[in-house]
Amino acid sequence: MRVPAHRASGHRRTRTVIATAALLLPLLGAAPSGAQTSANSLQLAFASAAAEYQVPQSVLLGVSYLQSRWDAHAGAPSVTGGYGPMHLTDARTALAGAATHHGEGTEDARGDSARTPLLPTAEVPTPAELPARLRTLPKAAELTGLSAQELRTDPAANVAGGAALLADAQKDLGEPLSDDPADWYAAVARFSGADDTATAAAYANDVYDVIRTGEERTTDAGQQVALAPQPGLSPATAQLAETGLRTLDTGGTECPKSVSCEWIPAPYEEFGDNDYGNHDLGDRPAAQSIKYIVVHDTEGAWDGVLNLVQDPTYVSWNYTLRSTDGHIAQHVKAKDVAWHAGNWYINAKSIGLEHEGFLANPDAWYTEAMYRSSARLVKYLAKKYGIPLDRQHILGHDNVPGPTTSTVPGMHTDPGPYWDWRHYFALLGHPFKATAKKNSGVVTIRPGYATNQPEYTGCVTKDVPCAAHGSSEVRLYSGPGETYPLIKDIGRGTAPTTGVNDISSRVSTGQQYAVADRDGDWTAIWYLGQKAWFKNPAKDPTAVPASGRVIMPRAGLKEIPVYGRAYPEASAYPAGVPAQAVSPLPYKVLENQQYVVGDKVPGEYYYAVTFTTDSHKVVVGKDLYYEIQYGHRVAFVRAADVDVRPSR
């Protein structure tokens, strides 16, 4: 997300839930040992709450999985003020207790950085100003007699609150408290908090997909939770008519049928002195191909973000995704070019997705509902436009290169180290896995998200460690050990740090690099023109062997330049279209260094500097480029400068 430069009595119930859970141990086949009771206490809490409120346990588990994957996040609120395994929302409390959100910079219409918070914490709304989906926890407190504090911090109480809400919805709909999970479709749809049938149905369908396939995992608190599959389950979807929700206007949206999607257009308008915003009209993919999908986080709450994208003096992106339920708003057609990536070449070749969230708040967690909705949208777009499902085409904003040397230090770093790329690509149906034998010449970065917890600083206060949290990223050192200095990015011009926004010495899950060396538990890769080492023990690897093509300087060349955009040669520009400089970045690929190839593309430039489209042109040159994984970001090298070969 970018901002332009110009602008009371709950103790009794809790004890009852825990006591009931203990009685259920023999029924669940669990031995009543202290260790096992502790490891299974959340599973028991689901069983207890299901029995007390007469909700099928599979429904309760399915709803909770879609909200939080059963994680408790140590009582910290989500992006939208949701707490605990059931994601009970209390957004007003979350906002009132939050520090100012920290982002990594914002950009003006063409991409320069200067981020500011979108929702200052002084502007805490009253309960009446919040939609119902952001205040389910107070209702759960009323239904259960548990205090709001217990519901926020005690996972067992939180699960009881979710069960009470489901049972209340079922009764309000005039449905019986049936033990058949198929009879709870409308109540599950209501639990989403959505105010329209499309969003509610998409949410309920996801819950029932989880129930049909089953799930099993160890949570962030070490709890072992399982939901047995029910493959033949067919919910009573006709119940949706009983919910009284509005019908969503989906006119003109470009979304798969499996998500809820509405059209909230970004304006294409003139303003000021020969200025216009906030995107450019185009003719993609006929005039130019779409090569990339860029994943962003919003650094702001849903309503405020939608207000911004409807401002013609602001910038634009193609889609926004809501955290509570995965609802999608489309703003710019895929044929048109949104201003979102901070690199005009990438803008012209990409689709931008903004996800409701905050980079520097590790416990402002993203919901499973949003991950799943986003994955379905990306699969749909990738299939439609022929975009490969890999980390050199599905980019984070933090993987977009600076187009010129002066822009490198200000490029964005969202969605940051807490976005779960491994889970996201599993949902995309393209999980990261080994594709070669041991000691291959290429590796795919793949740490375990929950157990991989490198230290970051500056989430709230500069240089102060962030809360320990799972991460998709792995730290890089200049030698095979943590006593060596961190890798330096010469383009940033500053010493490397562990700052949450400092990507100079980190690699991200799914990225692929050519191996430069190995030393015991440490692996070196070619990264930003140098050897970069990361810990990669055989018993707990942070990368897996991979195969692929790599580039290296053509024979006889000691070094070659690296570019942040693949622009045509000067002779390719027709009259009336100013030739764009093919400006190298302050980086080099030295002889004998290798970098993994992502794509081969012609030099291309989209000329669009006026409101009227009669002068818009796509210029395609004869010079070819290879996209490579150069550092944390991708980059480009001229095909004429390199040799391409299979990795050794």
Image: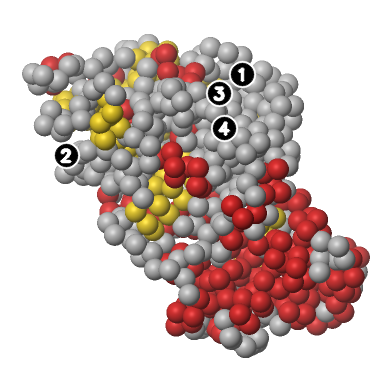
Residue type pointed to by label 4: Pro
Local crowd size for mark 2, using a 10 Å CA cut-off: few (<14), some (14–19), many (≥20): few
Q: Is residue 495 above or below residue 617?
A: above
Q: Which mark is residue 117?
A: 4
Q: Find the distance from the CA under tag 1 to the CA under tag 2.
A: 41 Å
Residue 554 visible in the current orientation = yes
Number of marks in the image?
Answer: 4
Q: In this image, 308 relative to 167: left or right? A: left
Q: Nearer the viewer, mark 1 or mark 2?
A: 2
Q: Secondary structure at mark 1?
A: loop
Mark nearest the camera among 4 and 3 is 4
**Mark 3 vs 2, N-terminal side:** 2
Under mark 2, the amino acid is Ala
Residue sitting at 61 percent across and 18 percent down? 496
Instruction: Say how the picture is coloured.
Output: secondary structure
Quick one: which residue is furthest to the left in this view? 575
Secondary structure under the numbered disc 4 in the rendered image: loop
- Frontmost of labels 4 and 1 is 4
Residue 417 lies, in percent from the top left, at 59, 37
Q: Measure the alpha-carbon separation of dots 4 and 2.
A: 37 Å
> How far across and how far down the image is residue 119, in percent?
58, 38
Quarter of the rendering containing residue 131: bottom right
Q: Residue at x 23, y 17 (%)?
A: 580
Along the line of sight, the residue nearer the viewer: 172 or 496: 172
Which residue matches tag 2?
A: 287
Q: Position of residue 17 (x, y in %)?
A: 84, 72
Question: Which residue is labeled 1 in the image?
Answer: 496
On residue 504, which mark appears?
3
> Mark 4 or mark 2, which has the lower sequence index?
4
The kind of residue tagged 1 is Pro
Marks 4,2: beta carbons within 8 A: no
Mark 1 / mark 3, whichever is N-terminal: 1
